[in-house]
Image: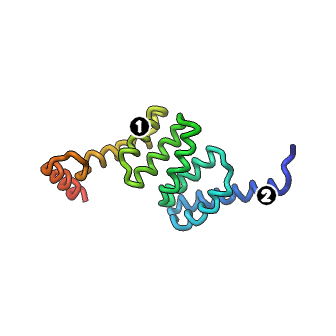
Amino acid sequence: MEKSAADDASASELKARFELTDLLSHQNSRAALLAELLPLQNEAPDDDATRKKLGNLFIAAGAPARAAPILRDILRRRPGDAEAHAGLGSAEFALGNYRMAQTEFVTALRLRPNDGDTRKSLDLCSLVLELDPARRGLSPDEQYARSLTLVEWC
């Protein structure tokens, strides 16, 4: 079955819109990127590769709450997708859900052990959890010591 001219035009338009989102992401133009992503989310194909790209772009746009359900949906269908686990880890980290982020990063590394970026993300997440002065079960002295460490770093 041959593609029609309308199908070709639609595919070309979609490709151009994704090129624009990539450019906006590289320029760190979060508001413009988000404005482009919102309608694109409903118009883009529903394949996993496109959805992962959208999820990662939503994270780059500062909208991790929009990325997380997209990436979770991919993981429901493909639980062994290391890239989706790493993306969900990034979204959860940006949302402040550090334990969930850590779990996703660990899973991604188990699936793709040599991923240096995910390793760095896991290390940062573990450090944040290690220094969290508000973690339940800490003594007041430990809370104080962690708080001092955080103040010294700032």
Q: Point out residue 151 in the picture as x, y percentages from the top left corner.
A: 21, 58
Q: Where, quadrant-wise, is the N terminus in this rendering? A: top right
Residue at figure coordinates x 36%, y 48% from the top left: 98
Q: Secondary structure at mark 2?
A: helix
For residue 142, side relative to residue 79 (left or right) = left
For residue 149, side relative to residue 103 (left or right) = left
- Which corner quadrant of the image does residue 13 belong to? bottom right
Residue at figure coordinates x 38%, y 50% from the top left: 97
Up/down of 113 relative to 23, above or below: above
| Disc 2/disc 1 C-alpha distance (Å) | 42 Å
Residue at figure coordinates x 87%, y 46% from the top left: 2
Q: Amino acid at mark 2?
A: Ala
Structural crowding at the residue carrying mark 1, measured as other residues with C-alpha within 10 Å and reported as few (<14), some (14–19) or many (≥20): many
Viewer can see residue 19: no
Q: Point out residue 9 in the picture as x, y percentages from the top left corner.
A: 79, 58
Q: Earlier in the sequence, mark 2 or mark 1?
A: 2
Residue that mark 2 sits on? 9
Q: Point out residue 94 in the picture as x, y percentages from the top left corner.
A: 41, 54
Residue furthest left in the image: 141
Structural crowding at the residue carrying mark 2, measured as other residues with C-alpha within 10 Å and reported as few (<14), some (14–19) or many (≥20): few
Q: Secondary structure at mark 1?
A: helix
Residue that mark 1 sits on? 106
In the image, 89 versus 109, the foreground residue is: 89
